[in-house]
Amino acid sequence: MSICVLQHPAPMPNQAIWQPLAQVAVRDKTHRAAISAALRDSGWAVVDSPSGYHLLQTIAGAITDDQLWCRPRMIVVDAFSPGCSGVTIARGIRNLGWSIPVVLIVYSEEHKQCLGDVAEESVYVVDSDRALSSIVELARHTINRPTQEATYPS
C-alpha cells in the first residue's frame, strides 16, 4: 500500500488543485444540499449523488480511469440508500484498501440497530438530526491534517 499525495492532474470544474473531494449521497434533497453547502464552506469540493447507486458509479469511474482527483477523501451516504446501501459502499471501500472517512446517516433507531457492528475505524454512524454538525466537525479535522494525503493501494 502506498500513500498518494493528491496532486490532481485535472481538477473538476471550480475545484482548486488542493481541495479534497467529498462525495455525498443523501436521499433527502434539502438535507443533501445543507451537507454539501457546509462541506463547501469548509473548503471541500463536493460531488452530489441522489443515491448510493449513483455514488458507486462515480467511484467506479475514478477507479477504472485511474483519476486520483476523482477519488474522494470522504464519503457521506445514507446507511440504507436506495440502489446500493451505505453499508455496502463502506465495506467495498475498505475492500479496496482505501482508508477514508465514511459517514453513514441513519434515520431511525430501528435502522441503527440493523447496522450491528458496521462502525469501525473511519466508519461513522450518525443520526440524521446530528449529521450536519458531525460531518462538519469531521471535515474540519480531515482537511486540517498537515498534508492532504489519502491512502490508496498502488
Image: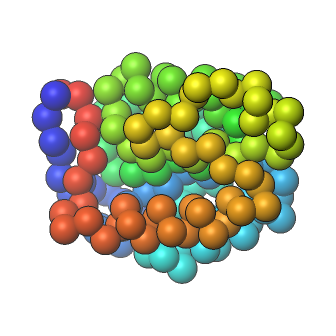
Name the foreground residue: 41 vs 7: 41
Q: Residue furthest left?
A: 2
Residue 53, x across and y down, in percent: 68, 30
Q: Quadrant of the C terminus?
A: top left
Name the foreground residue: 117 vs 40: 117
Can the viewer see residue 54? no
- From the viewer's perspective, is residue 22 above or below residue 137? above
The residue lying at 66 percent from left, 24 percent from top is 116
Q: Quadrant of residue 19?
A: bottom left
Q: Residue furthest top?
A: 95
**Coloured how?**
rainbow
Residue 90, x across and y down, in percent: 53, 31
Can the viewer see residue 123? yes
The residue lying at 40 percent from left, 51 percent from top is 73
- From the viewer's perspective, is residue 151 above or below residue 132? above
The residue lying at 63 percent from left, 69 percent from top is 133
68 on left or right of 25: left
How many labels, in total? 0
Q: Quadrant of residue 17?
A: bottom left
Q: Quadrant of the N terminus?
A: top left
The residue lying at 79 percent from left, 61 percent from top is 129
118 on left or right of 68: right
29 on left or right of 23: right
- From the viewer's perspective, is residue 41 above or below residue 39? below
69 on left or right of 24: left
Residue 117, x across and y down, in percent: 58, 26
